[in-house]
Amino acid sequence: MTHHDHQQDHSHAHRPPHSGNRTPRLTEVPAFTEMISQGWGTYVVEARVPDGAAEAAAAHRARLAERLGGRTVVVGAGRAPVRSNDTSYDFRADSDFVWLTGCQLEDAVVVLHGSEAVLYAPPPARPGDPAFFSDAMHGELWVGASPGLGEWERALGIPVRPLSELDAALAAGSGWWAGRAVPSDVVTRHGLERSAELARACSDLRMVKDAWEVAQLRAAVDHTVTGFEAVAREIPAAVRSGGERWLQGTFDRHARTTGNGPGYASIVGSGPHAPTLHWVRCDGPVLPDAALLLDMGVETNTLYTADVTRTVPPSGRFTAEQRAVHDLVEKSHRAGMAHVKPGVNYLDFHYAAMEVIAQGLHDWGLLPVSVDEALSPQGQHHRRWLVCGIGHHLGLDVHDCAASDWQDYMGADLEPGVVMTVEPGLYFHAHDLTVPPELRGVGVRLEDDLLVTAAGHEVLSDALPIDATGIEEWTARLLPAGAVV
């Protein structure tokens, strides 16, 4: 035997047993399935439903039943979408489902006969169930212990049945309305009607928040304010290295710690990125002398979200040009907020804020027409630098109540209990040749969350300053000592 042959033979001798064979499917190995099904202790995991959520959901169901005349409807929680191959995004339950149940359980479906509810949910895959070890998405061996149906029933105050019983429950009806997150195969199999009217009804009813919902939004805003403070403290580190993503990550970590997470993709735009309305890539540096736009909101564990924007100077001081833009946006912001009160048409705040913007741009010589012509429906020249809307309802969705018809949303009058944003801005892109060079690459937005009250409105986010001097002082105060850049 040659030395080479000896080496080959020695290597072969140390191969693992069964090397080269197909690995067995564990579900088909009786010895394994018997082994893994035994020897587990019993345990109870309580369903985590925030205080007041079940009671609020019961009141919401009663309002929906009154609106729909007791019609039977079917509303689903939905399922996390696939991110890539066999991985999924984090699950976030459908907002209408949460509003009606207080529950955030994936794949669950609620059937409402008027205000009477029955929830159908997948039981946890526990020891003895093959899915316990074979289902990497839902098996408890993979994802951890979870509440049983009994725990959910006690927490929610409504009957909870296995999801396997849903088909039998739906077979008893005909033409029932289905929400957007009910699986398509369920809709088809049982002749359900995917109803735009159901979506509109939930959207309309969610416009006026009850006291419990307002408390959730207060908490969301309060956590968002402290998140802004955490971000400001990290500005010097982001300037040195890490850039926009360091600040985005700072806020998102804060949101995950104080609530469910960010209510939407956090926007961090420095300098030439600030005029990009939805700058969520956040892949640029933080420039020390450029205005830094921060649009961020914490979503609470009850899934109500804040939505706040401030534009700050990383150095602690705005340049003259940045301050001029900020002052005009602030003037517009205050004009818009002054029109947020009961009995006033929803769009009045929009028109008031736009008038200030148009006048300011005209004073700077940027409008090719008069202010009146620019503000006319046939003009809108000023919208080149403010193409987006400047406010929206706020609640379980960051752009809440979006399924309502125009006349019930923008055409309606404000009333106490509405929570909305006001967010004018000016966005001068770096490649915009219609503005002077010193304005190019400057983007400024101010956004606050307002609660309409009987007397007018309350600015829920008023812990953050809105004037340029106040923002400079706020930023400088939070920057680490000696770290003003």
Image (cartoon, rainbow, N blue to C red):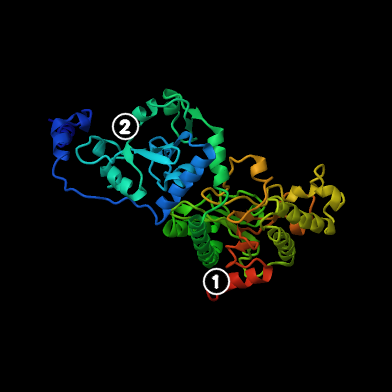
Q: Residue at image x 56%, y 43%?
A: 203
Between residues 233 and 305, which one lies in front from this camera angle? 305
Q: Residue at image x 54%, y 40%?
A: 67
Question: Regarding mark 1 in the picture, which secondary structure is present there?
Answer: helix
| Residue 248 appears left or right of 379 | left
Q: Residues within 10 Å of mark 2 (few under 14, many from 20)?
A: few
Distance between mark 1 and mark 2 Cα atoms: 54 Å
Above or below: residue 26 compared with residue 105: above
Report the quarter where the C terminus lies.
bottom right
Between residues 435 and 299, which one lies in front from this camera angle? 299
**Residue 122 point in image, percent of width and height:** 32, 38
Report the quarter where the N terminus lies.
top left
Which residue is disc 1 drawn over? 478
The three-letter code of the residue at mark 2 reads: Ser
**Residue 349 point in image, percent of width and height:** 71, 54
- Is residue 148 among what the camera can see? no
**Residue 383 point in image, percent of width and height:** 75, 48
* Whether label 1 touches label 2, CB < 8 Å: no
| Residue 247 appears left or right of 19 | right
Q: Residue at image x 65%, y 62%?
A: 456
Q: Residues within 10 Å of mark 1 (few under 14, many from 20)?
A: some
Which residue is disc 2 drawn over? 164
Q: Viewer-nearest of labels 1 and 2?
A: 2
Between residues 214 and 336, which one lies in front from this camera angle? 214
The three-letter code of the residue at mark 1 reads: Leu
- Is residue 359 among what the camera can see? yes
Q: Residue at image x 53%, y 60%?
A: 221
* Residue 383, label in figure: none
**Residue 417 point in image, percent of width and height:** 58, 55
Which of marks 2 and 1 precedes in the sequence?
A: 2
| Residue 23 appears left or right of 283 | left
